[in-house]
Image (cartoon, rainbow, N blue to C red):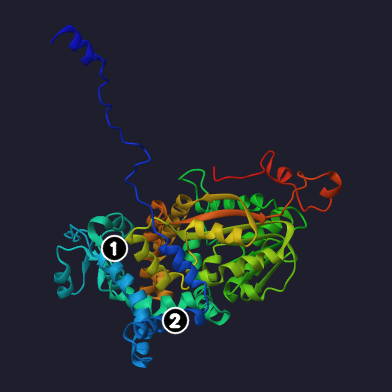
């Protein structure tokens, strides 16, 4: 090659190496299907009933236009019946089928459990056992655990299948849909009250002395349950900035730990609301023991029947799940109406994660079937905060305390297991086994984020602020965000 050709070749720029842009990701997000389901569940039963009627009318009308025939009532009737079967049945069938797609289904569960029936033992020998089959058989006494239940559950990915079974489908059709589309006062009382009226000794055997049926807050994984629960109660009071003389409402007060703590340590006048007389009896005795019975009142009624008044602080720790998706907006508007303009609302709610896996849903159906019936508002955070903002609230703080819940539930599991003989003597083997599954599995579910609990601090979304207007106008504005949220110890956290 001549020098001139060499120079020319050197002057030609080489082709740039193609680069993959970070925006050209292969990651995929979720669809809008869940939001659509939430929207449907907020509609009335009449509206839901009209959907297949409208679909049938459209199908029949289009058929008339195409064929030139008269109105076909047979086609209309068939279409009205087929519409919900297709609209609900096909997605459910696809979900069920997908849950059974697993490459490796072999397992040796013999070191951990055994079937009491030889035929059933042979049926599942060498195979992963569907989770629903496991807990139904265990509660019925057809399975005996050789190893500890919790330790066995840690091996669940190798031993069990998170697949939907006939038991799940039957519950979904017979009960779950009814619960989700109901949620009137009578239905909620029927689903919920008996759960908490079962017996205070039943709950005391796992909740321990604090009788606090919610997550504690741990500064160390070695903290005692009691220390974590007292820390949690104080955290809630600090979060809403409880002060002496505050009128405080606690919706779903349980056995009264928060109303009594707030009255005793912060001087509030607290009203608790519960559906269970057993809980109210315990709460009233607790208030008497704490010397605050003159400042604590417990109302046994549905939250919708609370007499109207204005409160400085409103708290709701894991009751709103039972309100249901159908009534969630109405519930938030009711709370907003009862909250003073400068008040603070603390909402704590458990929910499944948005990016779910099959275990999350199988666990959720178990919980709806046996532990928390009608708690369908256990939704991802986006639903909750979106509903709160729609209702006119301003979100100031959200924390995910799922790992704290895992530590809490593991202590409940140890308490429950330690009281085995007393529990079986009073309530029988089935109830003991049901709670062994619930507490062991939920410890794991909370640890891995399948279901977690969100602590949310809310105020009314006022259009102006004392710090954003002139001094004269500020006199008519409820509060200053700066004064409330800036300063030492103004916002407490898990740590």
- Residue at horizontal 37 percent and vertical 89 percent from the top: 77
x and y percentages locating residue 231 in the rendered image: 58, 50
Q: Residues within 10 Å of mark 2 (few under 14, many from 20)?
A: some
x and y percentages locating residue 326 in the rendered image: 53, 72
| Residue tagged 2 | 54
x and y percentages locating residue 484 in the rendered image: 71, 46
On the image, which quarter does residue 12 sit in?
A: top left
User: Which of the image's four quarters has the C terminus?
Assistant: top right
Residue furthest to the top in view is 3
Q: Is residue 420 found left or right of 345 in the rendered image?
A: left
**Along the viewing direction, whichever of 68 and 19 lies nearer the viewer:** 68
Q: Is residue 460 found left or right of 92 in the rendered image?
A: right
Q: Is the Cβ of the residue at disc 1 closer than 8 Å to that at disc 2? A: no
x and y percentages locating residue 80 in the rendered image: 38, 85
Q: Is residue 268 above or below residue 68?
A: above
- Residue at horizontal 25 percent and vertical 26 percent from the top: 15
**Along the viewing direction, whichever of 388 and 292 lies nearer the viewer:** 388
Q: Secondary structure at mark 1?
A: loop
Q: Which mark is residue 442?
A: none
**Along the viewing direction, whichever of 249 and 339 lies nearer the viewer:** 339
- Residue at horizontal 36 percent and vertical 64 percent from the top: 361
| Residue tagged 1 | 162
Q: Is residue 408 found left or right of 468 in the rendered image?
A: left
Q: Secondary structure at mark 2?
A: helix
Q: Residues within 10 Å of mark 1 (few under 14, many from 20)?
A: many
Q: Is residue 166 visible?
A: yes
């Amino acid at each position: 090659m001549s020098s001139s050709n060499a120079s020319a070749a050197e002057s030609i720029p080489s082709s740039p190496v193609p680069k993959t842009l970070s925006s050209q990701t292969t990651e995929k997000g979720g669809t809008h299907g869940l939001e659509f389901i939430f929207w449907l569940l907020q509609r009335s039963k009449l509206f839901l009933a009209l959907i297949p009627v409208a679909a049938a009318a459209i199908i029949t009308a289009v058929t008339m236009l195409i064929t030139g025939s008269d109105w076909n009532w047979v086609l209309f009737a068939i279409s009205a019946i087929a519409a919900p079967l297709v609209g609900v049945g096909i997605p459910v069938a696809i979900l069920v089928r997908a849950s059974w797609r697993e490459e490796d289904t072999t397992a040796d569960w013999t070191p951990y459990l055994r079937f009491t029936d030889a035929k059933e033992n042979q049926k599942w020998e060498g195979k992963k056992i569907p989770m629903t089959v496991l807990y139904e058989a265990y509660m019925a006494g057809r399975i005996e655990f050789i190893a500890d239940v919790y330790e066995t559950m840690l091996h669940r990915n190798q031993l069990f299948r998170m697949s939907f079974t006939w038991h799940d489908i039957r519950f979904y059709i017979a009960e779950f849909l009814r619960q989700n589309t109901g949620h009137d006062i009578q239905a909620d009382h029927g689903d919920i009250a008996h759960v908490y009226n079962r017996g205070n000794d039943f709950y005391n055997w796992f909740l321990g002395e604090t009788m606090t049926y919610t997550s504690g807050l741990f500064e160390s994984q070695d903290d005692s349950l009691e220390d974590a629960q007292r820390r949690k109660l104080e955290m809630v009071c600090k979060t809403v900035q409880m002060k002496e003389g505050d009128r405080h409402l606690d919706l779903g007060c349980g056995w009264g730990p928060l109303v009594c703590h707030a009255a005793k340590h912060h001087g509030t006048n607290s009203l608790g609301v519960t559906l269970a007389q057993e809980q109210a009896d315990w709460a009233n005795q607790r208030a008497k023991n704490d010397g605050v019975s003159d400042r604590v009142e417990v109302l046994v009624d549905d939250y919708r029947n609370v007499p109207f008044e204005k409160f400085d602080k409103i708290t709701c720790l894991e009751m709103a799940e039972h309100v249901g998706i159908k009534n969630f907006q109405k519930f938030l508007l009711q709370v907003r109406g009862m909250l003073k303009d400068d008040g603070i609302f603390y909402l704590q709610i458990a929910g499944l994660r948005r990016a779910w896996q099959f275990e999350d849903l199988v666990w959720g159906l178990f919980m709806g079937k046996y532990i928390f019936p009608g708690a369908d508002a256990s939704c991802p955070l986006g639903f909750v905060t979106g509903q709160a903002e729609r209702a006119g609230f301003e979100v100031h703080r959200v924390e995910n305390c799922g790992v704290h819940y895992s530590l809490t539930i593991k202590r409940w599991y140890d308490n429950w297991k330690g009281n085995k003989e007393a529990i079986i003597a009073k309530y029988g083997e089935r109830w003991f086994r049901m709670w062994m599954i619930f507490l062991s599995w939920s410890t794991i579910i909370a640890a891995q984020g399948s279901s977690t609990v969100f602590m949310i601090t809310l105020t009314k979304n006022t259009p102006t602020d004392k710090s954003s207007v002139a001094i004269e106008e500020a006199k008519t504005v409820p509060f200053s965000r700066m004064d409330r949220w800036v300063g030492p110890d103004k916002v407490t956290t898990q740590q």
